Each structure stands twice: as structure tokens, then as C-alpha cells.
Amino acid sequence: MASLRRLPNSPYWIACFTLPDGRRTQRSTKKTDRREAERVANKFEDAGVMARQGRLVENQARKVISDIFSIGNQDQLPRSTIKDFLTAWLRRKELEAGQQTHTRYGIVVDQFLKFLGGKKARDIAHLTSADISGFRDAVSERSAPSTVNVALKVIRAALNQAKREGLIDSNEAERVSLLKRVARSKRRPFSLDELRRVLEMANQEWVGIILVGLYTGLRLGDIATLTWTNVDLGQRELHLVTQKTGRSQNLPIAKPLLKHLESLPVSDDPHQPLFPSAYDLYTRQRFNGTLSRQFYDILVAAGLAKERVHAVTGKGSLVRHVQNELSFHCLRHTATSLLKNAGVSDVIARDIIGHDSEAVSRQYTHIETETKRRALDNMPDVMST
């Protein structure tokens, strides 16, 4: 049975109770009221009894602590399982972050919960740096260091929120080091001959996507979501706000691209996408993965990349791929190179491609559309034989 005593010169009652190994011990109840102190002492004794009987599982221990907390604070002890907290945090981020960011967070959270397995049902206060470093190491076996570091930063951000809410005392993810970025092969621009080989292997929709990428420097996600509302064939312009930077761009349409766009069937509905299949894939997944793999297959068909082996042989999506020196993003590098080779100034080339720079912001407040149009018209026509 638990009992109470008082020490000289202390206002608090001391609980005397039995530990699981049978030893008697004493703990301050931090209570001056005897009835409240008795309730705390009885909770200590109950926990000892359950432990001796092998019934003090995590949930019971948390309940005992929560009961003691509520006696003194007239409130419940904040608590949450790892799974419940991360799920709720992800829902909050859906409102606070952009769609792409939320999708990226969701992928990381899903991977982390799968890695934890049964541990995800534990209280988040029991999450350790060893759990997180194990997750980091597991991801590093199949992903590049930059991808691993993004995943770790997502977990850090989530646990910072848990700390602010009083669910944990410290962010265990901050004790886990980021991976050092290793030297990787540098991307390079396409040559004109390579571009023509790629276009020969592409279907009609991908020809259009590639031409837009080459003559505008737009990223794959921005191109996939273009609709006819973004296109002004009469003024030879594209109007859009980029997803990554939120930059509003008015881009002149180069003559080779204009010719291709004019050959496409125009819908009566201006909200119809320019590239329906790509649009459908991207809006369903909110991610470039499938589209990037399709472009890689085109590179393979053109003899510009090696075919990736399936997972059954130990390679494929479950292991880290060796970075190919050519990718869709290389069209941005190619556009920049072609513009500079045509004598276009660096500032104008950066403005067309959408590279923000301090020099551009400081020296130029506006570059006329006609100036950019003349620059684009100096680019070669890759569709000509």
C-alpha cells in the first residue's frame, strides 16, 4: 500500500510505494494538498503492481503518467502515436504548402512509416535518433544523397512541430547527420544531332513537349499542365506562372514551336490541355516520375541512354540508378547554349529560360518581348532536315 510522509522544511507530501522488484521507495508528489498527494501515491503504487504482474505495457504506462499529470494540471497530458501525428501533420501541410511540396512530404512520410513497421503505433516521444538514422541509411541504399537529405529534412520539420506542440522534448532528427553529397556526372546540353534523334523516336505528343522544353526552357511539370488558355497564337506568346518559383512569364513562341502548335487540333474548350496524356498523368500523380521515365525510354530508343534492368535481377527501381548525362532538364541547358551561340546576351538568355539572378534583377527591370522574340528566332530549327 502507498503511504505519505512529509520532510522537514518542505511543503510537499512524499509518496512511499513499492517498486516492481519489491523495494520500497519514495518520490515527491509535488502536492501540498493531502488528498491530491494520496491520488498521486496510489497511481505510483498501481504502476508498480502492474509492472510486477507484467501488465505495464506502453499504453498503460502512458495512462498512469497521464493520470498523474491531469491530477496536478487539470488537463490531459499531450500525446500522439508516431503514425497519428505524422498523418495529421501531413494534412496540415496540404493547406500550408504547395501541391508539389505536399506530395513530396507525403512520399517521405509513407516511406518512414513503412520503415518503422509496428513501431509507428508507439508514442512519438519514444521515437529515437537510431530509428531515424536507420531510415536514412535504408533510403540511401536506393537513392542519391540529395534525395536522402530531403527525406531527413522532412522528418526534422515534422518533429519540430511535435516539439512546439509539447509532444516531445527534443527533435531526435536533428541528431542525425545529413549525407555528404558525392561528386556526380554533370548534365550536359544536347547536340542538334542528338535532338533530332530524340524527336525521331518520340510520338506526336512527346515531340510537342520536347519542342516546348527546348524553345522555352520550361520544366516538365509546367509543360505537362499547359492548356490552350496559356497560348496566344495570334501574338505568338505563352503566358503562365511557373510551379517551382511562382514566376509569371510571358514567353514569345519561336517559329519552329509555333509551326508545331498550329498543327495541333484546337479544342473549343480553352481549358483543354495541349498534351492530354501528359496532363492526365501529372494531375493524377502531381509528380514527374512517370513522365521522366517515359522520356528516359525515348533516350534509350535514340541510343542516348542505357536500358535499366528490372528489379528481379537486383536492379531497377529498388536501387540507385546511375545518373544519365542527358535528361529532360538538359533541354534548359541546351536552350541556354543555343541562345548564347546565337550571340544572345547572358541576361536575355536567363530571362527567357527563367533563371533568376541578382544581376538581372539589379540591371534590368523589364526586357521587351520583341527583344526576346528576336533572340528566340535566332535559335536553329531542329525540325528541319
Image: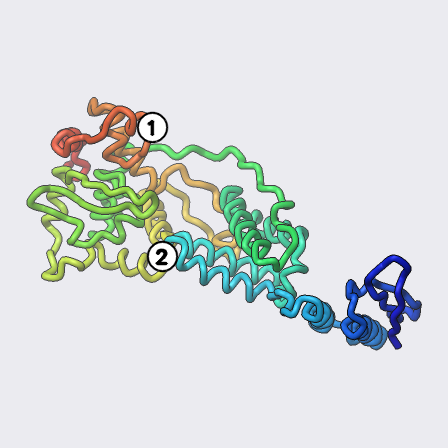
256 left or right, relative to 291:
left
383 and 137: which one is in front?
Answer: 137
The amino acid on which the numbered mark 1 sits, given as a three-letter code, is Glu
Gap between marks 2 and 1 measured at Cα: 31 Å
Q: Mark 2 sits on what residue?
A: 286
- As drawn, 157 above or below 372: below
Look at 48% across and 35% down and name the residue there. Answer: 184
73 left or right, relative to 260:
right
The amino acid on which the numbered mark 2 sits, given as a three-letter code, is Arg
Q: Secondary structure at mark 1?
A: helix
37 and 46: which one is in front?
Answer: 37
Measuring from the top left, give residue 343's x and y in whole percent.
20, 22
Look at 19% across and 41% down and name the residue there. Answer: 250
215 left or right, relative to 51:
left
Q: Secondary structure at mark 2?
A: loop
Measuring from the top left, give residue 275's x and y in whole percent.
22, 55
